[in-house]
Image (cartoon, grey):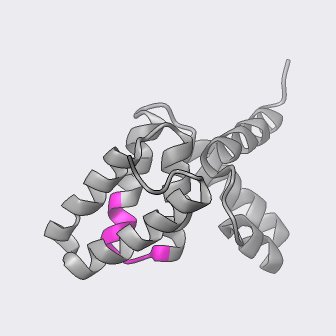
Amino acid sequence: MSDPMDDLKEKTQKTAELYFKGVTGERPFDLWRSFNKELAKELSMFVTGKLYAREKIPHKTRQLVTVAALTVLERTEELKMHLHGAINVGCTPQEVTEVIFQMATYGGVPVMNSALKVFREVLQEKGLWPLK
């Protein structure tokens, strides 16, 4: 019989790899861990292992919703990481772009422009720029 904690650790690692493979710079987990290793582990297992790993909605949908929220909130540093995640889970650049454009309605054109600049950086890092 497998240990539920080992299962959660494995699910956390698998989901983190799926979403954040290729993300450059400091990830939130690294920041958290620099302050409190145990709390970082607990937060990561909840956010990544329990919340992101839930299969109630597809990973693509979860990432598009996250991109929309972070765009409107102007959280560009966190947005960059989730733009990587969106591409990693199979969202097309066109789908992500459409979500960002729609956010002009809710956050304004300057917010949309900031998000598009960050997305362009991500696409360049992934060798997907210019768009075809």
Q: Residue furthest top?
A: 1
Identify the residue at horizontal 33%, vertical 46% (top origin): 94
Majority SS type along the magenta span: helix
The percent position of residue 82, horizontal first and vertical second, equals 51, 58
Location of the N terminus (image quadrant): top right
Q: Nearer the viewer, residue 27 or 93?
A: 93
Identify the residue at horizontal 41%, vertical 73% (top origin): 117
The percent position of residue 90, horizontal first and vertical second, equals 49, 37
Identify the residue at horizontal 66%, vertical 59% (top origin): 23
Q: Nearer the viewer, residue 125 or 24?
A: 125
Q: Is residue 98 left or right of residue 84?
A: left
Q: Nearer the viewer, residue 36 or 12?
A: 12
Q: Is residue 61 left or right of residue 112?
A: right
Q: Is residue 10 above or below residue 95?
A: above
The percent position of residue 84, horizontal first and vertical second, equals 55, 54
Based on the picture, tell me whether residue 71 belongs to the magenta stretch.
yes
Give the number of marks: 0
Based on the picture, tell me whether residue 67 belongs to the magenta stretch.
no
Q: Is residue 64 above or below residue 26?
A: above
Determine which quarter of the picture holds residue 91.
top left
Q: Is residue 54 above or below residue 65?
A: above
The percent position of residue 111, horizontal first and vertical second, equals 29, 77
Identify the residue at horizontal 20%, vertical 77% (top origin): 109
Magenta part of the chain: 68-76
Q: Is residue 60 left or right of residue 128?
A: left
